[in-house]
Image (spheres, rainbow, N blue to C red):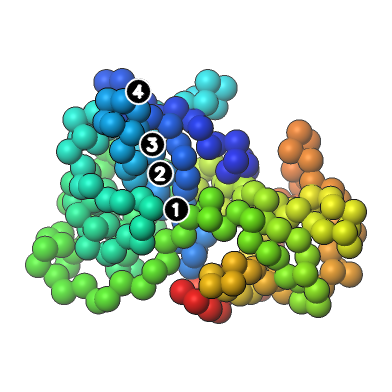
Amino acid sequence: MLRSIKSLIGFTMGATDGEIGKVKDFYFDDRTWQIRYLVLETGNWLFGRKVLLSPVALQTPDWNARVFPVNLTKDQIKHSPDIDAEKPISRDQETELHSHYSWPYYEGGGVGFMTTGMVGGVVAPDIPFEERISDEIQHPGEINLPPRELHLRSVKRVTGYDIHAADAELGDVEDFLVDDTTWILSGLVVETGNWYSGSKILLPTNSITKIEWETSSVYLDQTTDMLKNRPEFDYDKPISEEFLNTLKSNTSTDSSMLDRSGS
């Protein structure tokens, strides 16, 4: 099911032994659109410290109560590496974080998700860590990692970016829709400008061809004329089957090949 990222901000997160704080932001990989971390703002028990938690740690959410349970204890979180969630995260910091929690590594050299042994889009928690990673990365302290490129992006930061169609400025990024099974950002909600009466429209993220981080701009592969017939998006109405089919069929843009100027 697709869910609004904005609707998930403020969800309570609960460890196995008590509440640990609330969700304040999400970090996604700008090559795959996959959520890599939830940014948790802890309460008084940890002096309001912000920590990063992978979706791998999530158990079954309670959507009605707005609660994300995690399979971690408060002590594990308390003694996790102190990473400043307001600054770029280095690969060494990610490696330290994942080693602390025994979270899996990317098969492609990063850390986060793997493509095998997955249940509901995340690695099954009952599979031993040693069996989920390949031999060459079982000892992260012994491998020579290449310099890290910045691919982790804050959803909160991208919200508000200018969106440009192929022929004109379109509006602003208002929100993202995330698949609550795979934790991939599948769609973005656009607040259109005067050209479309300020309506909100929904677009698949794979229609994005370029992101300029320095100018806070997102570029699409469609013209305004191509977008004029899109129905207005309403948070209170179900997402149409037509749009869901678009997400499945629109594979013309390879997100790993996007031009991301300024990264």
Q: Residue 27: which numbered mark, if any? A: 1
Within 10 angstroms of label 4, few (less than 14), some, or many (20 or more) residues?
Answer: some
Q: Position of residue 34 (x, y in %)?
A: 48, 56
Q: Earlier in the sequence, mark 4 or mark 1?
A: 4
Residue under pointer 2: 39
Within 10 angstroms of label 1, few (less than 14), some, or many (20 or more) residues?
Answer: many
Viewer-closest of 259 and 181 = 259
Q: Position of residue 131 (x, y in %)?
A: 21, 52
Residue under pointer 4: 19
Viewer-closest of 172 and 256 = 172
Quarter of the image for residue 147 reads bottom left
Cα distance in 3D space between marks 3 and 1: 14 Å
Given the image, on which type of amino acid does mark 4 rest? Glu
Secondary structure state at the residue bearing disc 1:
strand
Given the image, on which type of amino acid does mark 1 rest? Tyr
Of circles 3 and 1, which is in front?
3
Q: Are marks 1 and 2 in contact (CB under 8 Å)?
A: yes
Residue under pointer 3: 41
Given the image, on which type of amino acid does mark 2 rest? Val
